[in-house]
Image (tube, rainbow, N blue to C red):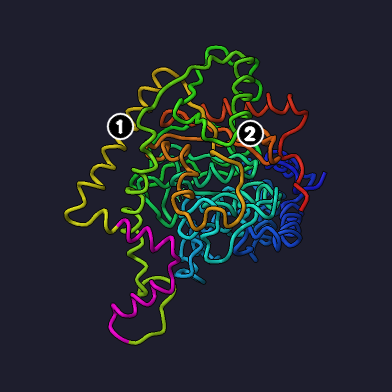
Amino acid sequence: MSLTTLTAAALAEKLASGEVSSVEATQAHLDRIAAVDGDVHAFLHVNESALSAAAEVDAQRAAGAPLGPLAGVPIAIKDVLCTIGMPSTAGSKILEGWIPPYDATPVALLRSAGVIPLGKTNMDEFAMGSSTEHSAYGPTRNPWDLGRIPGGSGGGSAAAVAAFEAPLALGSDTGGSIRQPAAVTGSVGVKPTYGGVSRYGAIALASSLDQVGPVTRSVLDAALLHDVIGKHDPRDSTSLKHEWPSFAAAAREGARAESLKGLRVGVVKELDSPGFQAGVSQRFHEALELLTAAGAEIVEVSAPHFEYAVAAYYVILPAEASSNLAKFDSVRFGMRAAVSGTVEDVMAATREAGFGPEVKRRIILGTYALSAGYYDAYYGSAQKVRTLIQRDFASAFEQADVLVSPAAPTTAFTFGEKIDDPLAMYLNDVTTIPANLAGVPGMGLPIGLAPEDGLPVGFQIMAPAREDARLYALGATLERLLEEKWGHPLLSEAPEL
Ligand code: GLN
């Protein structure tokens, strides 16, 4: 078996036993990137220091230093996260070539755990999008079918994992940008509880919604990664002070669980829509049958305000984004247009040249929604809807321990299909946005291929805030049940490229 097809957990075992070195594992992934990334375009930047970081971990291991469970395992990092020594562009021309003077906290935690950054992954500009077609550096292609989108905004991270260019990746999820790319590439993606992972050094899209999280090929790998990055950070005022249980332990227990007796699984009526792709609904209901056969109690719950979630999100997100993006003013970061004139002239020319159409659209929308006279009508109403959605979750979680839905309404669509229709693009996140509005954790995991197109279908599990361990426990059980059914994991070998 090649080093690039192992899960992170399996690779970590080989590293710990001395069977392989981190340099060998890292080199294997760099070779894979060199071989396939010309087609996939998951990476915007490959880390020149990856091998020296790997050599350092090997030396520490040889010296008998205590090392974390993922030490020596390589990881791909979404370009929204600041990294010392590597450009951090957030997929935008306005930050082209910008090398931050500090690491985002999740990156710093990974480096000190001995995890090896392989490079930075492609994304929709400032994480606005569902396909990576809004990246200023060209789209990423889905390894399952190079003519299709890998999801977005974190399509680069999901494609890197699904193309076996990296066993682990970091993403960020504001409205679904971890879970939806995971769904359409057959990978596992987790949006932690809001505040569960530090946002320090994550280039902000909408600060009340953004959350950094894992993208992997197995539930246990996501748990291992979450255990490393899920730490309180005094530099993020919204970071939770919470004693998190070991998510890896929850995943291992879930994988062993004989029965799901006593678990109430809530199917959200509003997210089980007849409008979804037929094969997506079919695989979703088959997964529910597996859970029922294992003893879980399936209950139907209603969340009547979820139907307004996308509308509320597309007022709140642009409002926050227009404020967050005001700092790209040609003075402090990145690009400056070569024009003369007043500071306003230079700023306007820089923003005109540096931002793509989707970013401009959202800045204008947000500025409008926040302007005097419209603030109450738009932003105020959207915040009220947000509260109603939070109440829907609270009452649903009285009836069920976890909530489930398809992770995305369709499988991967083709390039160009939705790019000129912002509303069609926005509707991709109809199943994922509610969790961001309420701050609750959600996982997307693969449940099979849609019969009509042979492309991966994702399943979403949501839990109450701070109960992320439930995602890993149930996710690992479902993953095992599916493997028993198929005889192998969905992503056991690289799709033909
Ligand atoms: N697709 C959503 C959007 O365009 C989600 C983005 C995200 O989660 N970063 O806003």
Depth check, mark 2 against mark 1: the one in front is 2
Q: Nearer the viewer, residue 481 or 14?
A: 481
Q: Can residue 114 be spotted in the picture?
A: no
Q: Amino acid at mark 1?
A: Leu
Q: Can residue 184 be spotted in the picture?
A: yes
Q: Nearer the viewer, residue 151 or 104?
A: 151
Secondary structure found at label 1: helix
For disc 1, the marked residue is 388
Q: Main secondary structure of the magenta part?
A: helix
Q: Is residue 7 left or right of residue 276?
A: right
For disc 2, the marked residue is 279
Give the quadrant of residue 482: top right
Residue at x-position 71% and y-position 36%? 490
Residue at x-position 57% and y-position 46%? 181
Residue 477 image point, x, y percent: 63, 24
Magenta residues span: 341-366
Secondary structure found at label 2: helix
Residue at x-position 59% and y-position 60%? 139
Determine crowd level at label 2: few under 14, some 14-19, many 20+ residues with C-alpha closer than 10 A: many
